[in-house]
Amino acid sequence: MAARLGFCLGSLLSFLDIGWKLCSGLTRAVLTNLCNAVGIFSDRCLMSPTLTDVYDKSASSEVNNSGQTSQSKGPENDSSDAPKSICGSKSSQFVDKTSGSKHGTMSRPVEGAIIVGAGTSGLAAAACLRERGVPITLLEKSGCIGSLWKERTYDRLHLHTPKEFCQLPLMPLPASYPTYPNKKQFLDYLQEYVKRFDIKPIYNTNVDRAQYDENSKVWRVQTQGFSSSNGIEKAEYTARWLIVASGENAEIVMPKLQGMKTYSGSILHSRNYKNGSEYVDKKVLVVGCGNSGMEIALDLANFTAKPSIVVRDSVHVLPREIFGASTFVVAMRLSKALPLWLTDWLLVFGTWLTLGNLARYGLKRPIEGPLQLKQKTGKTPVLDVGTINQIKNGNIKVVPKVVALMTSGVRFENGEFESYDAIIFATGYRSNVPMWLKGNFFGEDGSPSASMRDGWKGERGLYAIGFTKKGLVGTFTDATNIAKDIGRAYDHDMLQTAI
């Protein structure tokens, strides 16, 4: 019976795939924008291959999270000024009109846009703006681009969605890369991206405050940086446009549990976990059953540790591939052709055929479908990359909610106690934008408020990228929209100046 149902579902997916390919070939349009007397700039961001209109509101099922960054176009082969490595440069070359200082703060007017954050989102925005001829200044808190990928992820990390849905505008991931590139490959790609567009972030620069000045009609961005030669440097950048690209993963989320101070084992957040080499034969508790928690538990099992994973609530776990096709692609295409509830039903049914009844192993499924839940709460379903098999084989134990930490272990809500050598909290991250951006543009939870139209365009020249909970697909779309919007205004200003 299951085989027949699987065959029927596979046939339906094949039919939809053919229809998708026929339709997608008719939807590409070439958009050009006539600029000022100085020259003509093309909307190449809007014509980038593969992802132009691949993701719409009905398909808010992206299952992959990432970081951010920004850039600028320049000589592709000029290696003298390009960053020598993805991390390590203490500061970049920056040319601006320094107009003096006030109480030790340098005043730095910016002709174009200020971008805060040099992760994938900031890089994408910078590349598209530079392609439009809009000057950019990119401020980065850390000492490298893509710090989330470089410094805060585990070694075995791979993209969970196919590479064509994870590339940045104007430059696809290499054809030689596998379908799901690993961490090193993606970092190498970011490095080449920076070189290609001559992106020079200003590193080690923390934004303390950003506020719109009603009198001068500019954004004032106050920063505190550090250089080996001058020590702490304070500056105020001013610009007509401000792009928030610091992302949803700026600060860790660490729960406060009773007994954390007296627990004798090691405690760390997943941002500090690299691999399981130091946990061989040790009992480790992973708190958090999202994609990171599930994959860390798998990594620990592969290093012959004895991991347990806390599953407090119900969770959607989907296979990374269904019948040989990417689950993400299947979900996206089905949601364009069918109602969301029916797409969810097919995904859950396909998961049952592929992984079986996971409730038997302590993984209960939510009442709402994976895409409906994603759309309603932003909660991303887990894409399984091998953890479920380890759970079925008894190499990973599923445990309930933690009530308190004891000296040598943990007390669970069912009253049971178990000892552990280490606890890893894979409890996620949050945005820190409300801490430095003044105004009602972002809510207390760090998400764009209702004033930010579609999550990317605000008022008075404010923009955000990477906050639509659609992963790198959302970053691609946000970057093209922002570049188009700012580019038109900048072109108009230049034309008026020329006249």
Image (cartoon, rainbow, N blue to C red):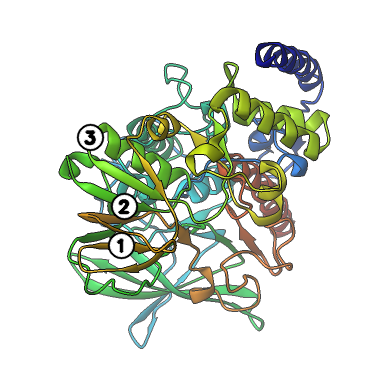
Identify the residue under disc 3: 303
Callout 3, which amino acid? Phe
Callout 1, which amino acid? Val
Instruction: Give the vertical position of 373 relative to 161 (above or below).
Output: below
Identify the residue under disc 1: 410
- Contact (CB < 8 A) between labels 1 and 2? yes
Mark 3 burial class by Cα count in 10 Å: few <14, some 14-19, many 20+: some
Query: Looking at the picture, how far across and down is residue 151, in whole percent?
Result: 30, 49
Residue sitting nearer the eye, 485 or 12: 12
Q: Secondary structure at mark 1?
A: strand
Residue 318 lies left or right of residue 419; in this view the side is right
- Contact (CB < 8 A) between labels 3 and 1? no
User: Which quarter of the picture shows residue 462?
Assistant: bottom right
Instruction: Give the vertical position of 139 relative to 337 (above or below).
Output: below
Q: What is the C-alpha distance between the residues marked 3 and 2?
A: 14 Å
Q: What is the C-alpha distance between the residues marked 3 and 1?
A: 22 Å
Q: Is residue 143 visible?
A: no
Identify the residue under disc 2: 285
Residue sitting nearer the eye, 429 or 409: 409
Question: Which residue is at a point 40% across and 35% down the rendered structure image?
Answer: 391
Quadrant of the rendering where the N terminus is positioned: top right
Q: Secondary structure at mark 2?
A: strand
Query: Looking at the picture, how far across and down is residue 76, in whole percent?
Result: 41, 31
Q: Is residue 61 visible?
A: yes
Query: Looking at the picture, how far across and down is residue 214, in whole percent?
Result: 66, 81
For the residues carrying marks 1 and 2, which lies nearer the camera in this image? 1
Q: What is the C-alpha distance between the residues marked 1 and 2?
A: 9 Å
Instruction: In the displayed orientation, state which residue is furthest to the bottom.
Output: 103
